[in-house]
Amino acid sequence: MPRAPRAILPSLLLVAACASVPEPRVATATPFPEPAPLVPRRRAIDVEHYALELALHPAERRLEGRARVRFWPIAGAAAIEYVELDLDGLEVRSVKDRAGRALVFRQSEGVLGITLAEPLAAGEFQELAIDYGGTPVRGLWFADDEQGVPTQVFTQGECEDARGWFPCVDDPSDRATFELAVDVPRAWTTLSAGVRTERVERGERAMERWRMDFPHPPYLDTLVAGEFVAKERAWEGTPLVFLADPRFEADIEPCFAATTDVLALFSRLTGVRYPYVKYAQACVAEFPFGGMENVSATTLTDTALGDERARRDAPMDGLIAHEAAHQWFGDLMTCADWSQVWLNEGFATYFGALWTEHARGEDEYAVAVRRAQDAYVAGDAKAARAIVADVARRPMDLFFTGHVYPGGAARLHQLRCLLGDDAFFRGVALYAGRNQGRSVVTDDLRAAMEAASGRALAEEFRAWFETAGHAELRVKWRHDGARVVLDVEQLQDAPATVRARVAVELDFGGERHVETVELARRAQTFEFACTRAPRWVLFDARGALPKRCEDVKTGEEWIALLEHSDRAPFRLDALAALSKAVPEARGDERARLWTAIRRAAREEACASVREAAVPVLATFRDAAARAELLAIAATDERSGARCAALAALKPNGPDAELARFADEQYAAGWSWNTMAHAAALLVAARPAGAFLWLQTERA
């Protein structure tokens, strides 16, 4: 039996059972202070190089280490007598300087304070040797226990957890080179930044040495160690390494197959060839995120790996693309402080959409952008803030409000629409090329885009990245015999007025005209001369503006959009609007709706639109709709559409035909998600035998 990501049927029944149990009301106290500005630290030193010697003892969940930290006084600073490094949860045993002198030190609240033996003047360097150890409480994790003993170790440094496994200046603007010698059980292999220069085996232990000569922040340093199998490939002479648990060896190559094409695409789009000595991707157990873009060595959750069934449900290439994009946006150049983190995550999210455009076409790209816009607007509606923001309890709180990932991507798409592809991608290449090895802020991107496009962008960047709020609009149009009159009303509380150039498309049945209008006031009316009434009028036809929009249209206009628009997001909008019309439709109107919606569910080229059409098709609730749903569930080439059809059949209740069909689809085992939905359908269609069937499947 192929490996399932989870025990499907027990999980389904557990979820169903828990759904009726009210969640207990528990009073909880936040461990964090109230949000406040995250003030960048004032540093006295600039670290040049970290050299770590670590020994991992998995049975005790302990590490012992020596860190050599070479640093200089910050340029222009006076001579320094006292140095602070970040180190949290581990005990320092001794500190010596490069002359071998023991130094006085103190640990308090995650800070290691060290008094130098003599003042360090500008232009001089010092190197400290720090012996330390203990059981890490953050930053380095022992995982995947077998009989109580971990078989894997991984680090996770973002945002401020590098200090959990070595003493450092744990700040995204402090870039240094890095080397690591790590002592591990002999059966283990390791992965770190840069190139492995040595492996020495001694008895039951082994030592591996790594070196990374490209300066980078501590949060991007990495160590993965454990009982892994490694697969190796190459892209244009650059070694590619893939690590995973040996149990998943068969999944490695098909899951990571997109890596070479991703690196080629991003090298072309940025104008900077993949810049490191290797690219590795390691899948580890119990990883808390989907992935982490450690420099030259991404760490991923092993739940992203999957057999053929799992790959049909969730291809891994989107995650691969996102983390690979970070090797440029985040690693090659890094946000100067966490208020600027959208430059890391927004670019990685947008480049994931560009990968989708490359791999799956313009429609799926447009859907990805619309989803990013919707996520951004939804997050901003809950808590309005600028994309560049520094008020939080801790830096990670800035990441998951919808502003940094989808918000940044949405604004990059808007910038692309404003400048056009040629100027936009020239700007991307200029931004990447001139900022290699630097800490960046949003003004660095603006300067590159202005240079590439020849236009001033200060107003747009201020509105898009430094101002809270988003557009909320009501749009309606009419034709008075001589012209189209388009009314646009701005409804949002903030900003006071959204200013934007917006494309308006008028379709006359095979003939389309696109006009550009300027949003500049809370209420505006635009007029377009035409004696014929258009089949539709589309406001923001390129989908450039992140917004909530009440778009007033007739049913015929929505049907025309569903059948003829060449933009997938508008076909999705049409489906959402038409779903409300189906239950009340009769006669010719119902037949017209059936034809359009059935075609969208069965013949639409864009898989996202097909999937969205399935539940709308189900609202017809007749024999014809049922037959179409059965066909989709059994034959559609995409898991999402099949699952939507299986879910849409559930409300029919007990039904012998559906029970047989569900049993067949489960036995066919096309994908794990379709099997789960088939199991749920079977329980609904044959509830009396569900428990016995479950016991048989678990046996």
Image (spheres, rainbow, N blue to C red):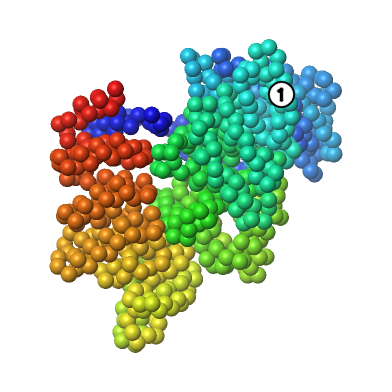
**Residue 165, placed above or below residue 533:** above
Image x and y of residue 178, in percent: 72, 33
The quarter of the rendered structure image containing the N terminus is top left
Q: Element under label 1? A: strand
In screen coordinates, is 154 left or right of 661? right
Q: Residue 384, relative to residue 94: is it above or below?
A: below
Q: How many marks?
A: 1
**Looking at the picture, how far across and down is residue 404, in whole percent?**
51, 49
| Circle 1 residues within 10 Å: few <14, some 14–19, many ≥20 | some
**Observer-nearest residue: 79 or 669?**
669
Residue pictured at 57% horizontal, 28% vertical: 229
Q: Could you tell me if residue 92 is visible in this image?
A: no
Q: Residue at x 63, y 32 (%)?
A: 222
Farthest residue to the top: give it.
Answer: 203
For image coordinates 66% across by 61% down, the residue present is 447
Foreground pick, 277 / 110: 277
Label 1 is placed on what type of residue? Arg
Name the one closer to the observer, 176 or 420.
420
Residue 209, position as x, y percentages in the image: 71, 26
Picture residue at 60% right of the left edge, 53% below the top: 265
Q: Which residue is mark 1?
A: 199
Vertical relation: 330 (above or below) 621 = above
Q: Position of residue 71 (x, y in %)?
A: 77, 34
Quadrant where the C terminus lies? top left
Q: Quadrant of residue 368?
A: bottom left
Location of residue 505 by image quarter: bottom left
Q: Nearer the viewer, residue 635 or 105?
A: 635
**Residue 662 visible (yes or no):** yes
